[in-house]
Image: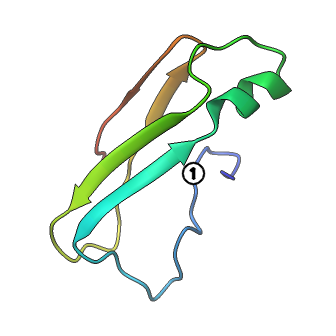
Amino acid sequence: MTNPDGRANNLMGPDEALVPGNYRLTFETGAYFAAQEIECFFPQVIVSFVVNNDVRHYHVPLLLTPFGYSTYRGS
């Protein structure tokens, strides 16, 4: 679940760091749009990404409309 700003700040503990590896975020977009009674085309959006070094912060935004989406690695 995201906060009012659309961020998931509590995926990991405050002292935990991502270790190198492959990760996947699954956004339940169908449930999000259904709650608003809006038809959508993508019921889930899965974003896979690679962490190559020990970085404590990753910003992975999902820009979403009922019939499309985009994502990127933010700063």
The reply, left or right, for residue 42 in relation to residue 49 is: right
Residue projecting furthest to the bottom: 15
The reply, left or right, for residue 70 in relation to residue 41 is: left
Residue closest to the eye, 61 or 40:
40
> Which residue does the image show at 59% across and 13% down from the upper left?
41
From this view, report whether residue 10 is shown above or below residue 19.
above
Q: Is residue 75 visible?
A: no
Q: How many marks?
A: 1
From this view, report whether residue 63 is shown above or below residue 14.
above
> Which residue does the image show at 68% across and 27% down from the upper left?
30
From this view, report whether residue 38 is shown above or below residue 11.
above
The x and y percentages for residue 65 are 56, 16
Residue closest to the eye, 34 or 75:
34
Badge 1 crowding class, 10 Å Cα cut-off, few under 14, some 14 to 19, many 20 or more, is few
The reply, left or right, for residue 29 in relation to residue 58 is: right
From this view, report whether residue 35 is shown above or below residue 75.
above
Residue that numbered label 1 is attached to: 7
The x and y percentages for residue 73 are 28, 45
Protein image colouring: rainbow
The x and y percentages for residue 24 are 40, 53
The local secondary structure at tag 1 comes to loop
Q: Quadrant of residue 61?
A: top left
Tell me which amino acid carries mark 1.
Answer: Arg
> Which residue does the image show at 53% across and 82% down from the upper left?
13
The reply, left or right, for residue 30 in relation to residue 18 is: right
> Which residue does the image show at 59% across and 69% down from the upper left?
10
The x and y percentages for residue 54 are 22, 77
Q: Is residue 3 visible?
A: yes
